[in-house]
Each structure stands twice: as C-alpha cells, then as structure tokens.
Amino acid sequence: PFEYRLAKPGEVPDSGVEEFSYSDYMLRYIVLALCSGLVDRVFWWRLVARGYGLVDKNDDGELRERPAFLALQHFLLTLGDSTFVQACLPEQRDQRHGLYQFEFERPDGEHLLLCWSHGPAIAAPALEAARIEDALGNSLEAIPKELSGSPLYFRDVTGLS
C-alpha cells in the first residue's frame, strides 16, 4: 500500500496543499455540493492517510486529527440537522470571485450564516450575530473586517429574510 512520507505533521507534500487550506477547500466543497440541490450526500475519501487523510497516521502508528477532520466535525455538529434556506453568491454568473454566503436554520430556530470569499479578501458583511466561529469552531472576539477563503460561522443572526 502507498503511504506518503512526510517529515513532520503540517509539512506540505509536493502534490498537495497545507493543512488549513485543505480544510477550507473541503468545507467549501461540501457546502457548495450539498446546497446545490444536485446531491443528497457527499463522501470523503480517506479517513486515515498520511499526508492527505482527515486523520494523519505517523510512523509509530499514532493518529492525529488534522484541521479538516475538526472542520468536518464542527460542520456536522452545527449544521447536520439544519435546513438550507438560501445562498448569496457572486453577482455575475461567470465571475466566481466575491462573497459566498449560505443561510441555514437549525431545528432549535437559530439562523446562521456560513460565509467566505473567493479570490481577494473582501469586506465582511454587516451582520448582527450573537457570536462568530471559525471553521474549527473556535469563537472569535469580534466580526473580522475582511473575509478570506476560510469559512466563518455567523451564529444566531438577526434581521435575515
């Protein structure tokens, strides 16, 4: 069996991306796929694989949860039973750069947005949110001034349609 050898966790393989970029790509892909209405579920290959799995296995056989694992875990815990309400995407159909904003309603009635930008960083939307979390579920102290490719959860948002 093939195993990609890395010198240490977090090192970027020649054929891949750094761990947090991988996590961001994965989360954006899952949201775009599921909210498209064209798929019922998304499967992610592989759970445990050195250098590209959701979990890394070192030479001693020890397992390490990578950022993508933690992002997927937070996504499923936060939105697993939620209903997708609507999306706000870049205005021009042929232009993919801009704001990606997905609204969800949780079974408890909480409205939340999952937002990121594609391309250059853009100004964060003016929202009234009780709290903001990064893709891994860490609470942020304040609304960031700009959005990047790293998805953010705007929790308990008021004033949505």
Image (tube, grey):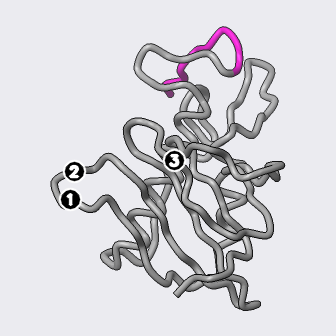
Mark 3 surroundings within 10 Å by alpha-carbon count, few (fewer than 14), some (14 through 19), many (20 or more): few
Which of 40 and 21 lies nearest the eye of the viewer? 21
**Label placed on residue 95:** 2
Which of 1 and 57 lies nearest the eye of the viewer? 57
Whether tag 2 and tag 1 are in contact, CB under 8 A, the answer is yes
Q: Is residue 23 above or below residue 91?
A: above
Q: Which residue is mark 3?
A: 123
Mark 1 surroundings within 10 Å by alpha-carbon count, few (fewer than 14), some (14 through 19), many (20 or more): few
Residue 148 percent coordinates (x, y): 52, 41
In terms of secondary structure, where does tag 1 sit? loop
Q: Residue at x 63, y 40 (%)?
A: 48
Residue 27 is a magenta residue? no
Front tag of 2 and 3: 3
Q: Is residue 94 left or right of residue 62?
A: left
Q: Residue at x 72, y 84 (%)?
A: 110
Question: What's drawn in magenta, residue-wise?
Answer: 1-9
Counting residues from the start of the chain, the first of labels 1 and 3 encountered is 1
Q: Is residue 105 left or right of residue 94?
A: right
Q: Which residue is mark 1?
A: 92
Q: Residue at x 67, y 64 (%)?
A: 154
